[in-house]
Amino acid sequence: MTDHSSRAAQILKDHRASIDRLDAILVYTLAERFKHTQAVGRLKAEHDLPPSDPAREARQIERLQALAAEADLDPEFAKKFLTFIISEVIRHHEQLQS
């Protein structure tokens, strides 16, 4: 292996280690977020509140898209990501109400 390819292999290894750490952060962050949304779902079920709040969801999507733009992340990707998370939260809330 040449010095150049050896250096490239080390850089690749470092990037992959960072990606692995960030994946762990994402998983733990999502778990923490879902703990809070599950508490919200139980509260909504106890008080006969609807499982979804379209106005808040729209505000959250706009907020996340703005944060994504600031972070140099595709706002459309951020919207798709949050829309997926919201759909899972609503599904959990609906299950709590049945």
Image (cartoon, rainbow, N blue to C red):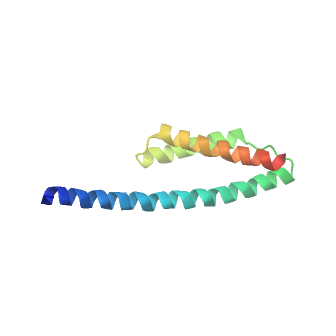
* In the rendered image, the vertical position of residue 83 relative to residue 71, given as above or below: above
Q: In which quarter of the image is residue 19?
A: bottom left
- Residue reaching furthest to the front: 1
* In the rendered image, the vertical position of residue 24 relative to residue 96, given as above or below: below
* In the rendered image, the vertical position of residue 76 relative to residue 3, given as above or below: above
User: Image check: 57 left or right of 27?
Assistant: right
The image quadrant where one finds the C terminus is: top right
Image coordinates for residue 66, horizontal then vertical, percent: 50, 44
Q: How many labels does the image show?
A: 0
Image coordinates for residue 39, horizontal then vertical, percent: 74, 58
Residue 59 or residue 43, whichever sits in front? 43
User: Image check: 10 left or right of 59?
Assistant: left
Residue 90 or residue 15, whichever sits in front? 15
Image coordinates for residue 20, horizontal then vertical, percent: 43, 59
Q: Quadrant of residue 63?
A: top right
Report the residue at 66% width, 42% height from top. 87
User: Image check: 48 left or right of 11?
Assistant: right
Report the residue at 68% width, 47% height from top. 89
The image quadrant where one finds the N terminus is: bottom left
Report the residue at 69% width, 39% height from top. 55
Residue 81 or residue 57, whichever sits in front? 81
Residue 14 or residue 33, whichever sits in front? 14
Report the residue at 45% width, 59% height from top. 22
Image coordinates for residue 50, horizontal then vertical, percent: 80, 43
- Residue reaching furthest to the left: 2
* In the rendered image, the vertical position of residue 78 relative to residue 28, given as above or below: above
